[in-house]
Image: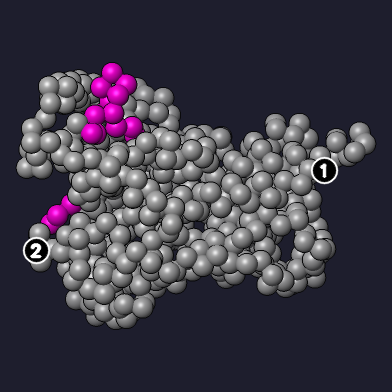
Amino acid sequence: MNESDTNSEVAIVIVGGGTAGWLTAAFLQNQLPHTLNRRVAITVIEAEDIPTVGVGEATIPSIRQTLAACGIEEHVFLKNCNATFKQGIEFINWRDDPKIAVGNSYFHPFGDQVMVAGKDATWQWLQLPEDQRAAYADQFSVQAEISKAGRAPKGFADKPFDGALAYAYHLDAGMLAQFLKNLCKRRGVRHIVQKVVEVERNGEGIAAVRLDSEERVSADIFVDCTGFAARLINSDKLNRFNNLSDVLFVDRAVATRLQNESLHDVLGYTKSTAQSAGWIWDIALQDRRGIGHVYSSRYIDDDAARAELAAYVGQPVEALETRKLDMRIGYHDQQWRGNTVAIGLSSGFLEPLESTGIYLIEMANWAMLEFIPRYLAGAQVQGHYNRILHNHYDNIADFLKLHYCLSNRRDTAFWRDNCDPSTIPQSLQANLDAWKAAVPSIYDFDRTTQCFSATNYKFVLYGMGWNGGGDPISGPADYATSMMADLLQRRSKLRDFVLRDTVPTVAYFEALQKL
């Protein structure tokens, strides 16, 4: 490559807007010129008549680093996206049939578990008789207690995107896309409101796209954010789709919204309530709740799913205003083909149970930031990039299936079939077999590019009532007793620290609204 090539402008065209397109534009526009030490021209092409798909309005803690990398101020983001804090997820009626065990629930918090002198006390907790154990999340984290007490994860004096506890956000996906669009356009991103009517392929890559205005747009790199249509990454229909519907059964959602009466209605965590053939999400934004029923069309029809949602919100089904969404569960084999990268729904989708939709957009962007310079220097990065994204999808799919296959529910065919070993991925089954006599370990998760680790698995495993870890003894040994006493002391100190360094959620957002 000659000197003029290394100093030339890099052209990136993103086809499709929404959260995927505009978050990618904001991230690359703010980060890539510094990484490349070259000028970068970014163009976003979107058709005005294609609505944003807002399936997931919840995120996980990685979003804070990503927003900071976009050069976004936290308080500006919170105000413009109707966002609130999220400290974890409460799972209701997942463990047992609610007709038998009413309101059974557990909590999956963010952040690390409480340790004792750097040691995991899970095995000692398992040695206690079951009726003497506190719930796992209550024993090994303070986050459920703090969030249910109406506390924010941070205080007024904390730095942006930082706090006493790990946190993410609930947000309005449509407002986020508009906020990012306005930000990008102010920073010089070109915005074309046109339909792409033709994709000109050049081998595995794309030479240009033609618009309905007859303009031909070429680029060094194309980013496909066209949703489930995958118009660029699979324009020739030769990109295999790894369908995971035999593992994750849900394929539809019906969503509604309810207004909050005040900020006192804002919960600092997502509620996920299991239903006959899926589950209902309940997310509190500053002025409203976003509520949706995710379900499997193989086990329940649309009318019955809508009726379950109406019963949950306490409204007559005929009065409920809803929007139905179809989901394709799985991911494309080639996430990066030639000069084209798929991000968002064009890449794949694995249902919103653990809020990984926006996370996968983030991870694709962070990986692109590393691989684009190599690609422009002539390296064949596609295979490496694709393996990384496959790791993310497979790790998430295993973790999502864990929630279903551990359930004691047998009240419907949906739950019975989810526990059928033939629907459990081999990688997950191998871990479950190992954990019958052991506690999940960091060595069970040896890839650096993954979302869910041993800590996440422990909160779900033991929240769901998993009793692996070895044969229980009749009474805890002295060492186990000592470890649990130290754990309780450590947790108490952490709780006092967090209460001192955080403020009520209502107070935080009242102050935010005055800015």
Q: Residue at x 16, y 26 (%)?
A: 480
Q: Is residue 119 in the magenta section?
A: yes
Q: Residue at x 85, y 35 (%)?
A: 7
User: Mark 2, residues whose alpha carbon is within 10 Å: few (<14), some, or many (≥20)?
Assistant: few
Residue on which disc 1 sits: 378
Q: Counting residues from the N terminus, which is met first, the one under dot 1 or under dot 2?
A: 2
Residue 347 in the image, given as x and y percentages of width and height? 58, 59
Residue on which disc 2 sits: 100
Residue 515 in the image, given as x and y percentages of width and height? 38, 34
Q: Find residue 89 and name its label.
A: none
Task: Depth check: give the residue in front, 322 or 398.
Answer: 398
Name the side, left or right, on which 61 lies relative to 22.
left
Q: Is residue 351 in the magenta section?
A: no
* Whether residue 485 is visible: no
Q: Amino acid at mark 2?
A: Ile
Range drawn in magenta: 102-123
Question: Is disc 2 placed on a helix, strand or loop?
Answer: loop
Q: Is residue 274 above or below residue 158?
A: below
Q: Residue at x 57, y 50 (%)?
A: 389
- Residue 234: image quadrant is bottom right
